[in-house]
Image (cartoon, rainbow, N blue to C red):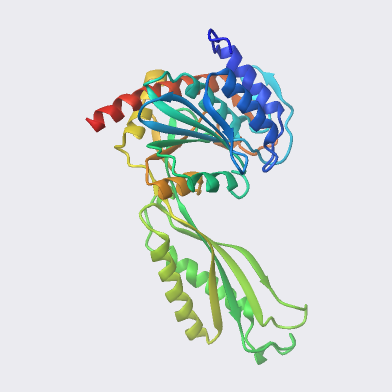
Amino acid sequence: MDTHFTVTPRFTVKMLEKALNLYTPSLSEKPMAEFLVDKCDDLGFEDIQIDEVGNVIAKKGSGSPKIMLCGHMDVVPGKVKVRKEGDSLYGRGASDAKAPLMAMLFAAASIQNNNGTVIFVGAVDEEGNATGIKNLVKKDMGIDYAIFGEPSGIKQVTIAYKGRLAINLKINVSDSSHASAPWLSKNAIQESMIFAKEIRDKLEANQDGKTKGMLLTATVTEIKGGTSHNVTPKECETTFDIRIPVDMNCKTVEQKIATLVKEISQEREVEAFYSILDETEPFEAPHNSPLVRAFTLGIMDVEHSRPTLIRKTGTGDMNVLGNQWNIPVVTYGPGDPHEAHTIDEKVSIEEYLRGIEILKKTLQHLKRLHDKKMQ
């Protein structure tokens, strides 16, 4: 590699364009992984590897703190013609999340030895089953701080994501009857509707005046029941997707559901069983952590205004990693989140370039603030 390799804004835009030309839906990330390995090599990274599930992992710099910059290489299905129009660069993954990923790559590349260690990760399957991140959290990597690359817009830092509980509720009534004599038996679908309403009303009660980021929501997402058009259903299954804000946890919500299911089934005299399909705890980064402060300063350096710290209503990789490793984690990246998954996805080139600068500054501030904290 030529050591006088200079990374110009033009070069970073060209590389993002190249990345967008690689169409990499979930679990078909190999072309993007090979492209990143190649770039990491050009940019002087060390210990470059592709792990057992296909994540790219590379190291730059040395000393403490150890910071992980993790973006994802996969995109949702559907091609978008790659092209430049004015300040916009179009392509599938332009905002979600190849602009954040490439911005992280170039910010990481700027780290000199003894200024902290950056572990750059291109993860697989974020849009699918999070195979990449689940494999990553199993390793003990000694990371102090982590940043996830998702489009947040460059003046917003995501500090919290809700948790999620997915529940399957099975209702069984003792008998079915002919639809012409419905009074002869209970109807499992109707009973399920009664359960669904009760559960939702009780879980969502007393939340007046709360912001959307702090609301507990219980939503019915699937319903299966009935065997024939003229027979009353004996069984019905309902799936609930429950989002849990950062001031609550899965356990207490689960206990509440257990109690409710028991009470309603006694009252209605029907059998009810529930099982847990998914359980992800909510996560919030401590606001006074060096990571959040470094971002605030980095954004002020470039944008000359304070960023907004936001709580998202979704659930992300940040939850898995933050809770497992118990470290400060935020999600950040250039790009408009509303462009994600759209049919003509694009990113502002200007915002992408400023995103790189903000990440560079943030890494510098983080080194200084971390050292100060350790003194």
* Front residue (pair 294, 237): 294
Q: Residue at x 63, y 80 (%)?
A: 188
Q: Is residue 299 visible?
A: no
Counting labels gives: 0
Which of the 4 image quarters holds residue 31? top right
Q: Residue furthest top?
A: 4
- Residue that extends furthest to the right in the rendered view of this protein: 229
Q: Position of residue 6 (x, y in %)?
A: 54, 10
At x 25%, y 32%, the residue is: 374
Front residue (pair 267, 131): 131
Q: Quadrant of the N terminus?
A: top right
Give the quadrant of residue 231: bottom right
Identify the residue at horizontal 68%, vertical 35% (top origin): 30
Q: Is residue 220 visible?
A: yes
The answer to whether residue 310 is left or right of residue 370 is right
Instruction: Work out which residue is located at the far left of the displayed protein and give it.
Output: 375
Residue 16 lies, with reference to residue 167, above or below; the image says above
x, y percent for residue 293: 32, 31
Q: Between residues 184 and 155, which one lies in front from this camera angle?
A: 155
Outermost residue toward the front? 47
Is residue 299 toward the left or the right of residue 32 in the image?
A: left
Relative to 225, say whether 278 is above or below.
above
Q: Position of residue 163 (x, y in %)?
A: 46, 54
Image spot of residue 347 (x, y percent): 60, 26
Check the image and report above or below for 65 versus 212.
above
In the rendered image, the quadrant that contains the C terminus is top left
